[in-house]
Amino acid sequence: MPELPEVETITRKLRPELVDKTIIEADLRWPRTLAFPSARKFKEQIKGQKILRVGRRAKYLDISLSQFNLLIHLRMSGDLFIKEGKIKPEKHDRLILKLSGDRSLVFNDTRKFGRVWLTADPESVLGKLGPEPLSRNFTLQWLYVALHNRSRQLKPLLLDQTFLAGLGNIYTDEALHIAKLHPLAVSDSITAKRARVLQDAVRKVLKEGIRRNGASIDWVYRGGEFQNHFRVYDRKGKPCPACGTKIERIIVGQRSTYYCPKCQMR
């Protein structure tokens, strides 16, 4: 699933292509792509809307329109393309927005897990998300208090989007390795000093991911190169870049989890 760096990369790529364009019509090719509203209302409401801003909140693309916000969550296999001229829909195209300037925004989603919202109240969808890890709200004081207000294993907690928004399996494993924290460490055992290290590690790995246009690890998300710089993720049996110990794999919360048993001792 695309995580914060991948969605940020897509957002930055789409922004200059979409801002100031007007949506002429919507071709909804699989109605269940819409989480809200109904297909009929969606087609009526989105027609004629001008795209004012293209942003991101956590793993959501947040496209501000004249009267609404268009929110898109790519989930497992969603992708977005700009195509010019008259287009022939492809097999897995779920939504096509015809735009001014003789181009279209195409949402392609092989596995059909991606979802789209058109709402005048984006907080109804985004309001429960935790702070952005690259924002000023992600302070050391907030992190330390938040960790100690809970008593949960670190990895599942960091994956919880209501706790901290945008992290997924890859960047959580990478951040925990940099911070030298075991994925099963209990959150309320983390000292203020270790919380500072974790805060810095989360920011470092996300910024590096964005700088490298995210990670391309299968056919779904393309164009990134962060996968060539993984420290632990998907590196079972390979040497830890810090100490040379073989990376181990365990299952945490039904997720494959990679860590160094020496650097990340419990």
Image (tube, rainbow, N blue to C red):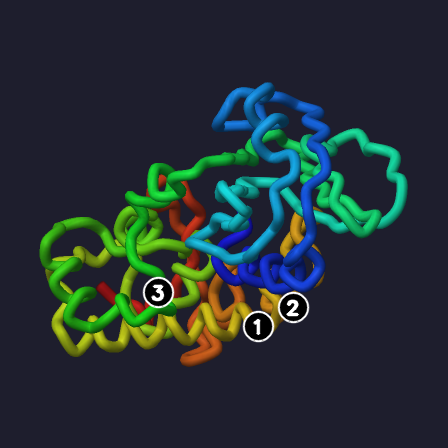
Q: Is residue 240 above or below residue 17?
A: below
Q: Which disc number belongs to residue 245?
A: none
Q: Position of residue 73 (x, y in %)?
A: 52, 42
Q: Are marks 1 and 3 in contact (CB under 8 Å)?
A: no
Q: Residue at x 52, y 50 (%)?
A: 64
Is 190 in front, or is 66? 66
Which mark is in front, 1 or 2? 2
> Helix, strand or loop at disc 3?
loop
Give the Cα distance between marks 2 and 3.
21 Å
Viewer-side residue, 34 vs 20: 20
Closer mark to the observer between disc 2 and disc 3:
3
For image coordinates 15% across by 66% down, the residue present is: 144
What kind of residue is marked 2? Glu
- The residue to which callout 2 is attached is 225
Q: Residue at x 43, y 80 (%)?
A: 242
Q: Position of residue 30 (x, y in %)?
A: 66, 23
Q: Quadrant of residue 197?
A: bottom left
Front residue of 69 and 255: 69
On residue 229, the disc is 1
